[in-house]
Image (cartoon, rainbow, N blue to C red):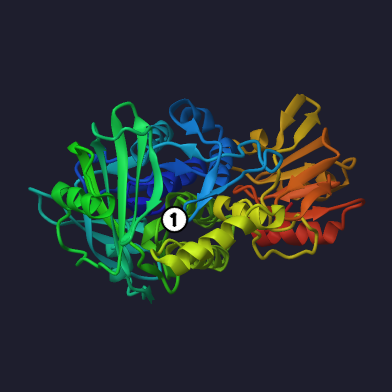
Amino acid sequence: MGHTGMDADVVIAGAGPTGLMLACELRLAGVEVVVLERLAERTGESRAGGMHSRTLEVLDQRGILDRFLDVGEPQPVGHFSGLYLEFDEHESRHPYPLMILQSAIEQLLEERAAELGVRVRRSSEVCGIRQDEDGVTVELRTPQAPPSTLRARYLVGCDGGRSTVRKLAGIDFPGTAATMTALIGDVELPGLTEDYVWVRRCAGGDFSAIAFEPGWFRVITSEYDRVVDRDEPTTFEQLRESLVRLAGTDYGMRAPRWVSRFNDAARQAARYRQGRVLLAGDAAHIHFPAGGQGLNMGVQDAFNLGWKLASVVNGRAPEGLLDSYHAERHPVGERVLHNTRAQSALARPGPQTDALRDVFSALMVSDDVNGYLRGMLTALDIRYPVDGDHQLAGRRVPDADLKTSVGATRVYELLHAGRPLLLDLGGGAAVAAAEGWADRVDLVEARSEDGFWPVPVIGEVPAPAAVLVRPDGHVAWAADGAPDTSALRAALTTWFGPAPRG
């Protein structure tokens, strides 16, 4: 530890996908991390079922995507409120949802975290926090052990929708209450004669049954205007009775592996940062899990926050850089809450909604409508508010093929180390202007093999002469033709701190 009196640079509460992804990002940058997990071991519950294109790109940018592709299964289509959505193979190298269960995602990320030296402490529950100008004292409760404390410079709550960290930090969680109840379980259905059931609408709601592996089905029932107290236990019998109410049969349902419940309550933290305490994932936002956006948004929260927090901890950027985390990610969360409310409304039973779904389905045939919904659900269309009017500024950089002095590569391979990247495609002027930042930014001269780069929503754009890419794969600055070196240096200073003197 480089900071006297600290047990870690950063303490993360929660060892789910968000917390583990954040821990990996911080350790990649040399930050000392401790992850606290309330549970004694992973539950093994399947939970969320997939990853979208942008999350697959995030994993590709760190060189670990193959681990997930080996376990998951690419799907030909996605959906918006159960209505099929086509994907565009030109927008990403990974233009598909990957069906992979959350339990597998957590296992793979925990293995990656262990490789990087992340410390995970299980059976450790946060029960108090005290902030001061130098750090955060985290009070812990551990079974069969006296209360203890950890001292760190920052604490990040990745501890779910009922986040203890959020409550202890006094951060409000406004939003809208539930209007329906959904039950979910992994079960056997020996009486189901179909290969699967996809969102079959009924008088009181809808149900689906999808095989994740031979013999086992993910069953989901959704009943509207039926709201259950969130503290009421969820049982297999409740799932069976719900399916009977909707389908008229339980298809011989038996042998539950796991059952749970969710609803369409939608809430978002009023702020993602309170001093030295930050929030990410479900601790920052909850919503109806329509379109499979929740886990993806949490992993992308971590990807946005990780390099910024590491830069501050390592003394390379001022603390104000952390404010850009809320500025960039809070609007993304707002948009997801907005579209999931729309999907919940579009799933309501009744002839009026049936008519609306027919009209909406017809509209989705349009390339513009399909592209808009696709970009929103996959998060490929996100554009952060950065300085500069270049059409790439703020967007995620396309994974273009490149030729460098050491051979062929592609943009995402140059981001594996988690460092900023200045890619000079125009003859070296940009690299020369940025030499003062060579200790913290990878300066690469290359030639683009692609004359045009695909950008969701706006189409193909000419390959730039130079592009400055943040560690999270978003463009901080770009130029066509001769670069404005003063604007480049300003962007370098804003995002990665001033160049060292001398």
Q: SS of the residue at dot 1?
A: loop
Task: Report which quarter residue 211 is drawn in.
Answer: top left
Q: How many marks?
A: 1
Image coordinates for residue 117, horizontal then vertical, percent: 39, 36
The relative height of residue 329 versus residue 443 in the rendered view (above or below) is: below
Q: Is residue 313 left or right of residue 483?
A: left
Image coordinates for residue 84, horizontal then vertical, percent: 54, 48
Residue beneath the point at 58% across and 36% down: 60
Residue beneath the point at 74% across and 37% down: 400
- Does residue 32 appear anywhere in the picture? no
| Residue that extends furthest to the left in the rendered view of this protein | 144
At label 1, the amino acid type is: Ala
Q: Is residue 220 left or right of residue 62?
A: left
Foreground of the two, 59 or 354 = 354
- Does residue 411 appear anywhere in the picture? yes
Image coordinates for residue 233, horizontal then vertical, percent: 14, 57
Foreground of the two, 59 or 336 = 336
Residue beneath the point at 83% across and 44% down: 463
Foreground of the two, 247 or 76 = 247
Q: Is residue 498 left or right of residue 224?
A: right
Residue beneath the point at 54% across and 51% down: 307
The relative height of residue 100 versus residue 499 in the rendered view (above or below) is: above
Q: Residues within 10 Å of mark 1 (few under 14, many from 20)?
A: many
The relative height of residue 265 versus residue 29 in the rendered view (above or below) is: below
Foreground of the two, 261 or 345 = 345
| Residue that extends furthest to the top in the rendered view of this protein | 407
Q: List the residue tagged with mark 1.
A: 290
Image coordinates for residue 412, horizontal then vertical, percent: 65, 37
Task: Report which quarter residue 421 is drawn in.
Answer: top right
